[in-house]
Image (cartoon, rainbow, N blue to C red):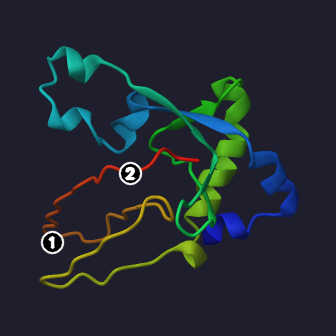
Amino acid sequence: MAAYAALSDGLKATLDGLKAVNASAKADIARTRAHRLDETSEQAAETFEAVHPVVRTHPETGAKALYVNRAHTVRFEGMTEQESAPLLSTLFDHQVRPEFSCRVRWRLGTLVLWDNRACQHYPLNDYHGHRRELHRITLKGDVPR
């Protein structure tokens, strides 16, 4: 939410109402789906796409947040990937700036939860020499608006 709030009024006006195409084929960046499937299965080869608003309004707080990410967002609806690339790159770089980040100091027993409607998970591989074990759950939620 802080990343959206820090945008200029002009950019907010440009983004409000835009929709973005998100594709599982781009997920190779984050390996979020295919690595859990048998690579030879039809489902592993299938590409899933979804169109979501670029700016999402949190259903409980009413706060706005950017709803694009480097791992899945491929283009703006109605535009080509090439046309979309400069603005998407700007948004991707903007939303991971340190002032919008929360860093966790992991210790045994640490538990972290985040609300994807209000923030984005952006892991850094800065734990060289240590094993990091994660368990992920996804709760059924609302349709992004």
Vertical placement of 87 versus 26: above or below?
below
Residue 10: percent from the left, percent from the top? 87, 56
* Label 1 CA crowd tier, 10 Å (few <14, some 14–19, many 20+): few
> In which quadrant will I find the N terminus?
bottom right
The x and y percentages for residue 36 are: 16, 37
The answer to which image quadrant residue 87 occupies is top right
Q: Which residue is mark 2?
A: 141
State whether residue 95 is above or below residue 110. Answer: above
Tell me the SS state at disc 2: loop
Left or right, 96 with reference to 33:
right
Whether 124 is drawn above or below 40: the answer is below
Q: Quadrant of residue 58?
A: bottom right
Residue under label 1: 130
Of callouts 1 and 2, the N-terminal one: 1
Disc 1 is placed on an element classified as: loop
Q: Which residue is rendered at x = 22% and y = 77% of the image?
A: 111
Please, what is the three-letter code of the amino acid marked with disc 2? Gly
* Residue farthest to the right, as pictured: 10
